[in-house]
Image (spheres, helix red, strand yellow):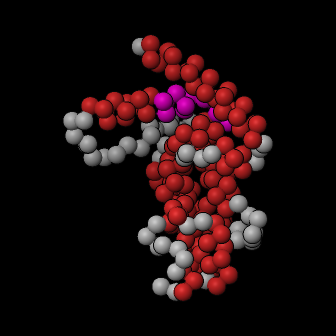
Amino acid sequence: MSASLSLVAPQAPAQWTEDDIKALHREQPQAAMEMVVRKFRGRLFYHASCITKDSQEAYDVVQEVFIRAMRERRFYDAEFRQKAWLYRVTSNLCFNLVRNRKRRGAILETVPRKERDEGDQLDRVFRGEQREEILAAIDQMTDAHKEILLLRYYDDLSYAEIAAVLDVKLGTVMSRLSRARRRLVDVLEPIRAD
């Protein structure tokens, strides 16, 4: 391990800050990109999977996002917001892919599920059913509502982070999220009434 990595715990990529990555880039550009990949690949893959409903397409999207990050000249600049940029590019690529798929008339598949069974834990099954029900309802919403709900509740981004990802003001995030939640309740009512 190099001396420049001593401030960063390699076993905990979530703890790395954008400043750590930018500082490392000055001395070791390749190591900095590896840090970016390790820090964000899981969350970006999950985000892409929620939008595309296809793990292979999500994997391809995330690879493309990292390729674009390597080519982005500003990516390691002091004021550049890496996380926001990565999520924005991921969302845009995913929504483009879904729109193209719809144009071709392909049928969307359900959200990827874990392959193994978790046993007889009734609460896990119930939570899984609720999650699928909610994601199915989110699928019926507009891209704008779908994106903001996924960013907030599945990617657990703060309002400020969502504002950066969507390149909108904080007040806009709050009003869009409020409208999206109301719409989600409207979509869920008939599903839960059955």
The C terminus - image quarter: top left
Q: Residue furthest top?
A: 193
Residue 80 seen in this snapshot: yes
- In the figure, is residue 145 to the left or right of 131? right
Q: How many marks?
A: 0
Q: Residue furthest left?
A: 120
Q: Position of residue 16 (x, y in %)?
A: 55, 67
Q: Residue at x 62, y 78 (%)?
A: 24
Majority secondary structure of magenta residues? helix
- In the figure, is residue 41 to the left or right of 78? left
Is residue 136 magenta-colored? yes
Residue 93 seen in this snapshot: no
Is 78 located above or below residue 138 in the figure?
A: below
Q: Position of residue 175 (x, y in %)?
A: 72, 31
Residue closest to the eye, 60 or 156: 156
Q: Residue at x 66, y 28 (%)?
A: 178
Q: Residue at x 58, y 18 (%)?
A: 186
Residue closest to the eye, 124 or 45: 124
Is 189 located above or below residue 163 in the figure?
A: above
Q: For residue 95, what is the image quadrant? A: top right
Q: Position of residue 107 (x, y in %)?
A: 50, 36
Q: For residue 100, what is the image quadrant? A: top right
Is 164 located above or below residue 72 in the figure?
A: above
Q: Position of residue 38 (x, y in %)?
A: 50, 66
Q: Residue at x 52, y 64 (%)?
A: 15
Q: Which residues are magenta?
A: 134-145
